[in-house]
Image (cartoon, rainbow, N blue to C red):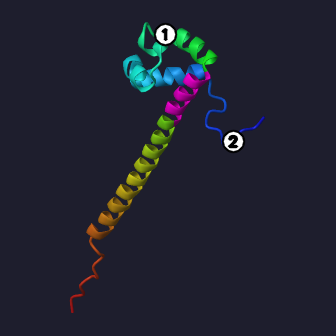
Amino acid sequence: MDQPNNPLHGVTLKAIVEELVERHGWFELGDLVRIRCFTHDPSIRSSLKFLRKTPWAREQVEALYLKGLRSKDRRRKQNRRRAEQRAFRAESESASTEAPESSPILDD
């Protein structure tokens, strides 16, 4: 089954939890998604076990992951736009600072 518009397609729950823990840490993750497996003796294994059995918690974790993907994509686009603007400015400045070729002075 092909799902080209589903950003979660092909991403495992384990990969999602690992990325969220890397990005936020267990403490902040427990504040963002109020579930016990993130706040009391957290581990990837216990979190996966709980999330696989609890649809509402999994939905919250996936929503947080997707929010991070959108902001990451937005930052990437902003950085690309800024780089293009810097390159354009640098190109414009170098073109304006180059001395125009002067015509040779002929001695009569």
Q: Up-down: is 22 above or below 39?
A: below
Task: Identify the residue shown where x is 31% and y is 63%.
Answer: 94
Work out which residue is located at the far right of the displayed protein and give it.
1
Check disc 1 and report the residue beneath it.
Answer: 43
Which sits in the foreground, 76 or 99? Answer: 76
Tell me how many marks there are. 2
Task: Identify the residue shown where x is 39% and y is 52%.
Answer: 83
Say whether residue 43 is magenta: no
Check disc 2 and report the residue beneath it.
Answer: 4
Task: Identify the residue shown where x is 42% and y is 44%.
Answer: 75
Q: Up-down: is 106 above or below 13?
A: below
Which sits in the foreground, 33 or 7? Answer: 33
Q: Up-down: is 77 above or below 36?
A: below
Disc 1 crowd rating (10 Å Cα; few below 14, some 14-19, many 20+) is: some
* Three-letter amino acid code at the position of disc 1: Ser
Say whether residue 56 is magenta: yes
Q: Which mark is residue 29?
A: none
* Three-letter amino acid code at the position of disc 2: Pro
Image side of residue 8 versus residue 103, left or right:
right
Image position, residue 95 (x, y; %): 33, 68
Which quadrant of the view contains residue 22? top left
Q: Which residues are magenta?
A: 55-66
Q: Secondary structure at mark 1?
A: loop
Image position, residue 86 (x, y; %): 35, 56
Q: Up-down: is 53 above or below 84?
A: above
Which quadrant of the view contains residue 58? top right
Image quarter where the N terminus lies is: top right
Which sits in the foreground, 39 or 65? Answer: 39
Work out which residue is located at the far bottom of the displayed protein and give it.
108
- From mark 1 to mark 2, how far is it between C-alphas? 32 Å
The secondary structure that dominates the magenta segment is helix
Work out which residue is located at the far top of the displayed protein and give it.
41
